[in-house]
Image (cartoon, coloured by chain):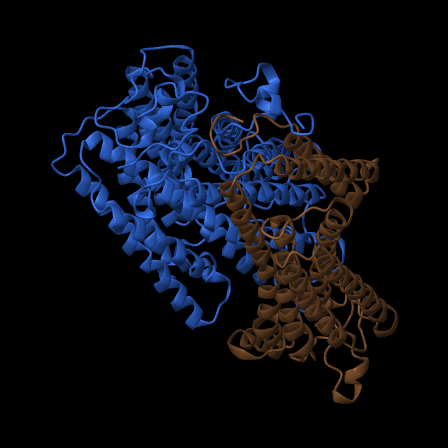
Amino acid sequence: MSAVVENHHDDHHHGPAKGLKRWLYTTNHKDIGTLYLWFSFAMFLIGGVMALVIRAELFQPGMQIVEPEFYNQMLTLHGLIMVFGAVMPAFVGLANWLVPMMIGAPDMALPRMNNLSFWILPFAFFVLLSSLFMDGGAPNFGWTFYAPLSTTYAPPSTTFFIFSVHIMGASSIMGSINVIVTIMNMRAPGITLMKMPLFVWAWLITAYLLIAVMPVLAGAVTMMLMDIHFGTSFFNAAGGGDPVLFQHIFWFFGHPEVYIMILPAFGIVSHIVETFSRKQLFGYSSMVWAMLSIAILSFVVWAHHMFTVGMPLAAELFFMWATMLIAVPTGVKVFNWVATMFKGSITFEVPMLFACAFIVLFTLGGFSGLMVAIVPADFQYHDTYFVVAHFHYVLVPGSVFSIMAAVYFWIPKWTGNMYDERLGRLHFWLSFIGVNVTFFPQHFIGLAGMPRRYPDYALQFADWNMVSSVGAFLFGFSQILFLFIVLKTVMGGKKATSEVWEGARGLEWTVESPAPYHTFTVPPKIN
Amino acid sequence: MSGGNYYIPDSSRYPIFAASSLFLLVMGAGGTINGTDNGSTILYIGFVSMLTTLFFWFRTVVKEHLAGLDSAQLKKSYVFGMAWFIFSEVMFFAAFFGALFYVRNFAVPWLAGEGEKGLAIEFVRDMGVDFWNGFQNTWPVLTTPDQGAAYTTPHKSMSFPGWSHLVEWLPLWNTIILLSSSVTVHFAHLGLKSGSRKKFNVWLGFTVGLAIIFLGLQAAEYYEAYAHYGLKLNSGIYGSTFFMLTGFHGFHVFLGCIMLSTMLARSVFFNHFEAHDHFGFEAASWYWHFVDVVWVMLFFFVYII
């Protein structure tokens, strides 16, 4: 019988395999988590270089460095790569590493499918990036790929873009199914739903959102494919369809998608704030209910991305109020983080620095979100740099900072070594200053009327654009320091204890550092 | 396997093979559609390698099960996994149903100058601009707003043809067939649970037969549409929604049919499945009930109203 079952003979073989095979064939959640995180970092650098191309061109008015066509391709790929290649895989990588350890599970529930979810991604992004070298260039219609720019007027490489989105979606759906099944079925006895760590809760909700909306995105790109190549008219008014239909379908996916990129961050920040405040988290159950409310509301706010496109007044009002309602559960979360810190004995190690910056700057991005949620005001803000500033504030010092915080927080558990605190602080301050110098001025030029997505601009916007570009290069190059710090920690450093952080709560801090290749093969006892 | 009760394979070659097959599949499909050299060859290789990988992957899972490596907890993982997979399929169809509802309730009336946003089109027309004048808000849309300049104009739709033609209306028969097949697959399940392999095989055989008849009738329906009604994929929004919804449904019926046939073959040739242990079959039957529900929605929203 042993011949028919793969590796059955390896029953007593506990360590990882050697060489490349380990990474190609692995079913270990820690290996796969590591793969996701490194892939995400590579994409972060590629997408970052594209951002720097954009900022270099915008350093001065006039066309200096790239052609407008190429600028559009950079803009499009930057968005797609950062969303689907950097932020989402980073969170999936963290889920892989942390969820099984936090709930006392031996691994993810479906380990082989877990491997497949990861390995689809490098192929998907190879397909997407190869479109740069195709006739007519890469997709050039922005990461939201509105029809008819992405259908009637799209470059031929759009076909490949569509298929790469399809397989990215398949990867996300399989990854999310794995996360949900792991959380629902693999918790150690005693870990009831309302005793789960918040990162686990955040991911449970995120995975549900992903399974609900990634298929809708697949439907949207399929309709594009059919419109382009097979004569349908979903997005063509001449045939009775409507380009606005595309926007509705896209944002029905897109709005839950932006919460997919922030809910895991909420979980991470909750863990870090309670650890470094040396207090139990304030308002655990309200945190859970807030995330659930945010997730449910995310399905009924999509059209606030399209206030200027033409909608009945009643729809505009509904989407405005529904959107503003989200500020309530989000406010609950911010309040709880601050209340957790209140009278805590706080220290500011690097994860806490990033988490504090997250709370302040994400809230700032949330406030500008409230501004763009107001219909009459949005008529002015729409498609300006104000919107660019808004979503970069929630995504960069929001999602990306939370990922960096998570790396600093858990890397001692992953590698067994402490990171270099001094270099980490330097990285934090460079990033913090870089981010604000880059994106804060974009509020001003946006309110002054500079439209987004153009490679050139009127002279009155020159000063703030120059400031923004300087900040972008500062932020971009400080990430090389981040890479250096991570590599240095992997290579060696002060040995970490099991607990790593004084008073750290959670099962992952009960196993030794670095975490053994297999943890919790027998479920731990929970009181 | 790592010591605990929960079976975790130490490593597997199947996922990376599946991922690379998927890569070939999408490069090949893109190449074929864009007309690049070797596109269809790559597509073909990707397709074959994907099928081969899936075959061996599923075979391994079945063999692990027979070897007793899985536990009740692992089975529960498969149950949850299948349920959430079906949910993702529901959301895929939701996108296309959403498109149908949107064009019927908003886009088509507005294009015909009705409603709040139709005012804008009326305004343009009042200025003397020929903006698809004469387009009427009817469903099914047979004549497109551009009066068929870029699209073929069918002379008949697939909708309910009136009570006098009820008997020769294929979708009605297809509804009866698919609903019956959901019942027969349930009988097969009951047979299996009562320990009768014969009942299981016979009823499951019936189900597969009904599935094939359904697919045959759908093919006849498409032939009818193309050859006799002039209704094509490029017949404007009606043809788009009709063929995409029924087409994706038909494709899912085809997949479900393959799943059920596989389960039938496993039972007939290998005596797989026990009265208390048959999740492979249950998963396939859930999928089958799911395509059935989608069809009921289709019958109602695409064919009747």
- In the rendering, at what x and y percent does residue B216 appear? 82, 64
- In the rendering, at what x and y percent does residue A82 appear? 50, 36
Q: How many labels were placed on the picture? A: 0
Asked if residue A275 is positioned above or below residue A283 in the image, the reply reads above
- Chain in brown colour: B
* Residue name at image x 63 percent, y 55 percent: A148
Task: Say left or right for A5 vs A192.
Answer: right
Asked if residue A6 is positioned above or below residue B177 in the image, the reply reads above
Q: Which one is nearer the viewer's eye here, A523 or B224?
A: A523
Q: Which one is nearer the viewer's eye here, B245 or B36?
A: B245
> What is the quadrant of residue A476 in the picture?
top left
* Residue name at image x 43 percent, y 32 percent: A94
Q: Which one is nearer the viewer's eye here, A64 or A94?
A: A94
Residue A426 appears in the figure: yes
| Residue furthest to the left | A343
- In the rendering, at what x and y percent does residue B264 appear? 74, 52
| Residue furthest to the front | B195
> What is the quadrant of residue B69 in the picture?
top right
Residue A442 appears in the figure: no
| Residue furthest to the bottom | B164
Q: Quadrant of the C terminus of chain A?
A: top left
* Residue name at image x 69 percent, y 52 percent: A225
| Residue furthest to the right | B227
Chain A is which colour? blue
- In the rendering, at what x and y percent does residue B295 appear? 66, 67
Task: Say left or right for A316 vs A28.
Answer: left
